Amino acid sequence: MGQPTSKQILLIKTVLFFAALLPLAWLIWDGVQGRLEPNPVEAITHRTGDWILNFLLLTLTVTPLRKLSGLHWLLRLRRMLGLFAFFYACLHFTTYIWLDQFFLMSEVWKDIAKRPYITVGFTAFVLLFPLALTSTNAMVKRMGAQRWRRLHRLVYVIAIAGVLHFLWLVKSDIRSPLIYGFLLALLLIMRLPAVNQRITAFQRA
Amino acid sequence: MIIKRASDIKSSEITDKSVYLRRREFLKAAGIVSAGAAIPGLLVARAEAAAQKLIYKKNAAFRPNEKLTPYQDVTTYNNFYEFGTGKADPARNATNFKTRPWTITVEGHAKKTGTFDLDELIKPHALEERIYRLRCVEAWSMVIPWVGVPLADVIKRMQPTSKAKYVQFETLHDPEQMPGQRGFLGGGLQWPYVEGLRMDEAMNPLPLLAVGLYGEVLPNQNGAPVRLVVPWKYGFKSIKSIVRIRFVESMPQTTWNIAAPHEYGFYSNVNPEVDHPRWSQARERRLGEGSFFAPKRPTLMFNGYADQVAHLYRGMNLKKFY
């Protein structure tokens, strides 16, 4: 497959944009249908949390997939995937602070300071801001590609913190966080220089 | 010690034998239910229609002025890891669970040990309904009308000896019927599920051996055919589908305590001042109240049963014995 035209990219991006909103639409639909009962706050928190991790992993899949497939235009979808991780993180955090804690800020700060899973989750959320704010083309230009790339390596820290947040909150059934952890480890290993070189060599062969 | 003789019990208080017999029809109906399991709405409708009514007396002492959690919520949002770790899993996976015939083995330091048929064990007692708050360790709560018999009355008939300092309970271990007990990691718990009470806790009037809720035979996902209800302790102490009762001298090793000793103690009394290491226990979300724009409510000491049970822990450091 050759390089798609700008028009085709725009179409792909538009489809991706609406597809990325489907989890939210599905959540709202389930809410309207009463399927989030009897603990809707928990259901909303878990579902938005799952989609943060899904979008983070998808974002991190772009580079290795691009290298393996040679479809370099995939890179042009990465920003949107990352921003949707941020979007679902905002929903997740709003659910926590509003529906779960009811803006009881004393409780929220205590949670953030005392509960390791909330500490790492909140840290990941805060770290998403500089990435979201510097995601525009103008910001890349202003910062310079080198510095921009260095800053955006924070996404590795964010993804690890996100998986830890999930792992540390479950009571005993750690299967789901382990799956996320395994996939994340795989994506990170593919970025190790030694592995990366092999992927490049494999591509050229 | 009062052991009720049959003549002490009004006939109206005794569960009619035909009611017990008709449970078998319920089971048959439940078998049909599983065929309709693909359509959740239909499943609920049929299960409700098939549910077996019990004959019981309402205990006026336990009718708090609190809104009951709807039947639908009580029976579809369950922690019963034997049938899966998701809240909706037990209602889905327990439809074919066989609850008759059911025996309970009584062992250890008691005079009346042996294996007893559940119906024979319950029959000498009058079923009563008690509305209890249920506080889960995960910081949500429900208000449930249980039907059962006081645990203390049943234990008295087993005649525990002076060596019995604790009573230990075990859930059925049957991976064939309980998918949560099969396979990789098994939900992270060791099977069979074990719980226990100190003897004085067990002999307190509050703990109930429940065989029903909302006036009907206990749904499988709620711990059928017989479960413990200890309302001043976190929900996981209220062990489900009991097959073994053992009177022992030393404190039993309980399932969640083995899984995470610094998080789940033997006592596990509801206590807003002692947090779970990973989350606060100061407040709780009452489920089934309609709007999720309702703030959480403060958790009460001993789940609001301090008058009945606080004396059991006098002089104990409840932060240490969590």
Image: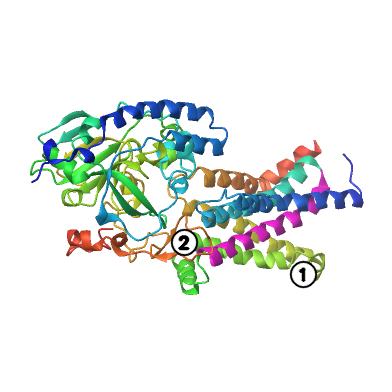
Q: Which residues are magenta?
A: A71-100
Mark 1, mark 2: which one is toward the viewer?
2
Instruction: Tell me the distance, in whole angstroms, between the alpha carbons under discs 1 and 2.
Output: 33 Å
Residue A112: image location, x then y, percent:
49, 67
**Residue B133 in which image quadrant:** bottom left
Callout 1 touching callout 2 (CB < 8 Å): no
Q: Which mark is residue A153?
A: none
Q: Nearer the viewer, residue A122 or B15?
A: B15
Above/below status of B216 relative to B281: above
Secondary structure category for the residue under label 2: helix
Q: Which residue is mark 2?
A: A116
The numbered dot on residue A143 is 1
Crowding near the residue tagged with mark 2, few <14, some 14–19, many ≥20 C-alpha atoms within 10 Å: some
Can you give x and y, in whole percent of width and height, for residue A156 in the image?
63, 56
Asked if one can make out residue B5 in the rendered structure from this viewpoint, the answer is no
Q: Mark 2 is on which residue type?
A: Pro
Q: Output the chain of dot 2.
A: A
Pick whichever, B219 or A25, lies toward us.
B219
Q: Judge if badges 1 and 2 mark residues of a common chain.
A: yes
Asked if residue B175 lies left or right of residue A48, the reply is: left
Q: In the rendered image, is residue B167 in sight?
A: yes
Quarter of the rendering occupied by the N terminus of chain A: top right
Residue B257: image location, x then y, percent? 31, 48
Q: Secondary structure at mark 1?
A: helix
Q: Nearer the viewer, residue A189 or A170?
A: A170
Quick one: quadrant of the C terminus of chain A?
A: top right
B135 up-or-down from B42: above or below: below
Chain of the residue on which disc 1 is drawn: A
As shown in the figure, which amino acid type bears the numbered disc 1? Met
Residue shown at 35%/49% (left/top)? B145
Residue A49: quarter of image: bottom right
